[in-house]
Amino acid sequence: MKKIITIAIDGFSSTGKSTVAKRLAKALGYVYVDTGAMYRAVTFYAMQNDLISDDAFDKEGLIAHLDKVKVNFKFNENLGFAEVYLNGTNVEQEVRNMEVSQFVSQVATVSEVRQRLVKQQQAFGKDKGVVMDGRDIGTVVFPDAELKLFMTASAEKRAQRRYDELLERGDKVSYEAVLENVQSRDLVDSTRKDSPLVKAEDAIRVDNSNMTLDEQFEFILKLSEEKISA
């Protein structure tokens, strides 16, 4: 008899976590939760309300605003996945831009933000049958997840993927700016005091520097099916 499990996918920015998690959830008939989009939505709110900029970050102001920040997902049947909503407005496209990427790691260092979103994430996955990706899923959100993966790749590879993705969206950016953003986020994510990005002891490391999307997906699907059938 097949088990229903929780799959936690952690890793550095632009390692393709969301892409493979989305595809994996669809293949298994599981719910997919993009926790990175949740932090991006809070960041977008902070930007809209002048709480963060190149020159300043009003952490206390953001904390005071948290009760006004409602983040949730709604399934889009045409796209085949859930899109992120901020206070009732679809912000799926807005939260993916470089401006949000520039500030999201700073927002994610705020303990009050993390605590609130972690509770929401745990509620999403309380019945298992979920694929969740982020930075602290296997270490904080679901430390007892049956399958934990930690995805990585060289900063240069990740920057190139992100750069190509942004160009496809029509964003005007330079590769150098994207690489700098990737490296900066790596540093902030790995050194923050609350829930730093670290590989869980029992997580399987997946270095996809030289893997295609299909190769990566097939490898992770096989691991998942083995765990479900064990």
Image: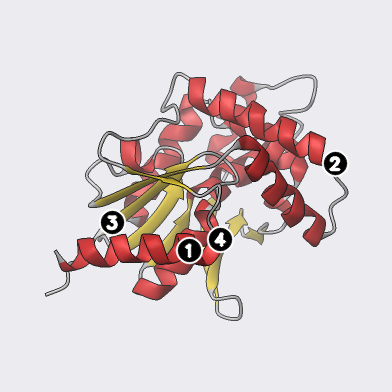
Q: Which residue is mark 1?
A: 215
Residue marked by disc 3: 6
Q: Which residue in the protein does label 4 denote?
A: 212
Q: Which residue is label 2 attached to?
A: 174
Q: Position of residue 135 (x, y in %)?
A: 46, 39
Which x, y percent locates residue 98?
76, 43
Within-10-Å neighbours for mark 2: few <14, some 14–19, many 20+? few
Place of residue 189 in the rendered image (x, y in percent of width and height, measured from the top left): 53, 28
Q: Give, as a three-letter code, the residue at label 2.
A: Ser
Tell which of 51 and 207 is nearer to you: 207
Q: Is residue 55 left or right of residue 96?
A: right
Gap between marks 4 and 2 measured at Cα: 24 Å
Task: Tell me which label, 1 or 3, sits earlier in the chain.
Answer: 3
On the question of residue 45 being in view, the answer is: no
Q: Amino acid at mark 3?
A: Thr
Viewer-side residue, 101 vs 230: 230
Residue at left offset 25%, top offset 49%: 145
Q: Which element is circle 3 on?
A: strand
* 3D distance between C-alphas at marks 1 and 3: 22 Å
Q: Nearer the viewer, mark 1 or mark 3?
A: 1
Q: In the image, residue 230 lies at what x, y percent?
A: 14, 63
**What amino acid type should be assigned to the residue bearing mark 4?**
Thr
Image quarter for residue 77? bottom right
* Mark 4: secondary structure: loop
Q: Say which of marks 2 and 1 sits in front.
A: 1
Q: CA distance from mark 3 to mark 2?
A: 38 Å
Q: Under tag 1, what secondary structure?
A: helix
